[in-house]
Amino acid sequence: MKTSNKLAAKRKSKRSAARAARKAAWKDATTAIHAGESHFRVSGPVAPTIVRSSTFTFSDTAEMKRWAEGRSSAYIYTRYGNPTLSLAERKLAELERAAAAVVTASGMAAISSALLAALESGDELISTRQIYGGTYRLMRDVFPRFGIRVHFVETDLAGIERLVGPRTRAFYTETPTNPTVRLVDLEKAIAFARRHRLVSIIDNTFASPVLQKPLERGFDMVVHSTTKSLGGHSDFIGGAVAGSAAWMDRIRKMVIYLGGCMDPEVAFLLIRGMKTLHLRVRRQCESAMVVARFLERHPKVARVHYPGLRSHSQHQLARRQMRGFGSMLAFDLKGGLPAARRFCDRTRLFLLAASLGGVESLVVLPIFTSHYKMSPAELRAAGVQPGTVRVSIGLEDAADLIADLKQALT
Ligand SMILES: Cc1ncc(COP(=O)(O)O)c(C=O)c1O
């Protein structure tokens, strides 16, 4: 019995070594399609199966007991885990170069699970100020009620050392930022977090793992709103956290207790979305560059926020830490809010809708969407002006997008 166990273990470790060697050689585009799939050299479907079951059978009470003792990783209930969710998690983990990932019901579920796993009452958190408005409001309005104090720092991290105290536990950031596409210097940020032994968490939604892999630089956890470019088709809400196995165990517990698990149907859509992530992001970056150049030359535009432009103050930093400049850009119209509203009411191809990263181009006024309920001082600090317009570039032909912008600006 012992010998056969040893043999099985040997065979298993050979298989996983072969798998690891194969994966190490894969580029991202291949990883996105094949990572985590079991369709090699077996007869079966090419597309993943959606396991809709909420619950799973135990073979007998012995297995039930093993599970209760933490000696079995069998699926028992979808909030705890599900094969379709596991595949989505494997794929994302490999794209982010993480040991593991946990998918969640939304980006906010991922963010709150990551932060609550890292912090406890009495702890302090340092976060960059220019982050998704929902995350900012969670930190500003909810965390203090649970005894978690948050200090905000600007994207250049100026004066950050002064914010560190004996109870500082974690550092949170987002780059590029929402909505004005400012960058946080990842090298500087991680050096700071390491110096003070802080848990480091980064929202990688805007860049996606195609353009930036923060875990490779030393971050502890990456969070995503998979609603955006990972899903890519504006047809579901979802989120994910990726990082070490130890952190993901803690995240899994948060998701189990707080209940923010992903639905298997959504996991299927996420898996499908990730398979084309590369092509979509590359094409969106190209079109965003064309749009940014057009807007930069337009007489009604005061300023374009896109790090791909040579004129952008963080262009060199973007070249250093990103593999492309992204699909998001913002611009300030000379006529302020009235001009911005006129423009948004006139676009035809650009849909007037929040969210980003989908196949269709979208336009919004951040003061009425991601940054609503913020004081003028908070808006100024976030770099948001009343006339700031944010666009998410989709997969339409760039010439059609330019024509639409032209007519809406006229
Ligand atoms: C950068 C960023 N992070 C997180 C979120 C929250 O994600 P979700 O809407 O999936 O909860 C958003 C939503 O717009 C976002 O833009």
Image: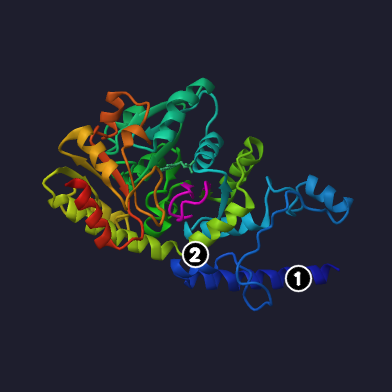
Q: Residues within 10 Å of mark 1 (few under 14, many from 20)?
A: few
Q: Secondary structure at mark 2?
A: helix
Q: Is residue 321 above or below residue 133?
A: below
Which mark, residue 276? none
Kind of element beneath mark 1: helix
Q: Is residue 266 above or below residue 166?
A: below
What is the magenta segment's predominant secondary structure?
loop
Residue 45: give x, y in percent of width and height: 65, 72
Is ligand 1 within 8 Å of the beta carbon of the residue shown at mark 1?
no
Closer to the camera, 387 or 286? 387
Q: Residue at x 19, y 49 (%)?
A: 312
Residue underneath mark 2: 275
In the rendered structure, the answer to whether residue 91 lies left or right of residue 157 reads: right
Q: Amino acid at mark 2?
A: Lys
Q: At which x and y percent is residue 358?
A: 41, 54
Residue 84, position as x, y percentages in the image = 64, 57
Q: Is mark 2 within 8 Å of ligand 1?
A: no
Q: Classify the position of ligand 1 by quadrant: top left, top right, bottom left or bottom right.
A: top left
According to the image, label 1 marks what residue? 8
Which quarter of the image is occupied by the N terminus? bottom right
